[in-house]
Amino acid sequence: MTELLLRDDQDGVAWLTLNRPLARNALSAPLMTALEAALDAIEADPAIRVMVIAGAGPAFCAGHDLREVQGLGPAGLAALFAQCSRLMQRVTTLRVPVIARVHGIATAAGCQLVATCDLAIAASTARFATPGVNIGLFCSTPMVALSRAVGRKAAMEMLLTGDMLDATRAAALGLVNHAVPDAELDGAVRSLAQRIAARSPAAVRIGKPAFYQQADLPLAEAYALAAAAMVRNMAEADAAEGIDAFLARRTPAWGG
């Protein structure tokens, strides 16, 4: 049986590849289970500093597997969407930054996955949509991540029309960080991942959760949380090393 998910570690970067190319990497329950297990393994692996999610074949991810969804009753559907919600939240809470490498299409829950990742780089020919409304299924769970990535009006337009966005528009809206020529996609993702991997693991480990926690707080509470994160960060050996290296004009030697 073909592995549903492939992992390749390169210089502190874990590359996970969704491997259902004939199904456009649709997020079946077994694939989501494999992803959850891989995220747990990466969380526990101190050698990994960045994670990349990619798709095999002609597409990044076409969302949920409609053949699987069609055969489920209410209890099965509730379990499937609960699993998907748990997976998306796990990406956000993972201690390392997660980059989506997007080519082909990223639709419905595939678009949700792009919006959920901390960063995303798309090939210039990539396309994005939440097209559930076209088949009578409003993309309600994808809208959670989408509305937090692109803003309400842009999200509502995508959700209400189901229209495809090109990569340039997706970048302008903030759904992806950059749209690059197809031939440059791997290089751009690798360059971004390596730049992040070269930073202090302790700073990233403290900073990533603080970013998401403060984003939904009132201003005063957000500053209080951020100040507490700074205090924790300053107590780390990496902070002392980084400041000393900066003042001495040398390259810092980060800890774990």
Image (spheres, rainbow, N blue to C red):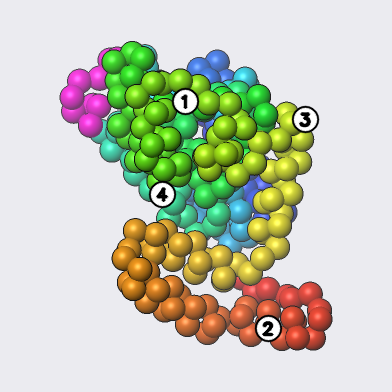
Mark 2 vs 1: CB contact within 8 A:
no
Distance Cα–Cα, label 4 vs label 2: 32 Å
Amino acid at circle 3 = Ala
Mark nearer the N terminus (4 vs 1): 4
Residue span colored magenta: 70-78
**Disc on res. 129:** 1
The residue under the point 68% across, 79% down is 242
Mark nearer the N terminus (1 vs 3): 1
Distance Cα–Cα, label 4 vs label 1: 23 Å
Labels 1, 3: front one: 1
Amino acid at circle 4 = Arg
Say if the magenta span includes residue 74: yes
Which residue lies under the disc numbered 4?
Answer: 90
Distance Cα–Cα, label 2 vs label 1: 44 Å
Quarter-wise, where is residue 88 in the image? top left
Which residue lies under the disc numbered 3?
Answer: 183
Amino acid at circle 1 = Ala
232 with respect to 247 (left or right): left
**Disc on res. 27:** none
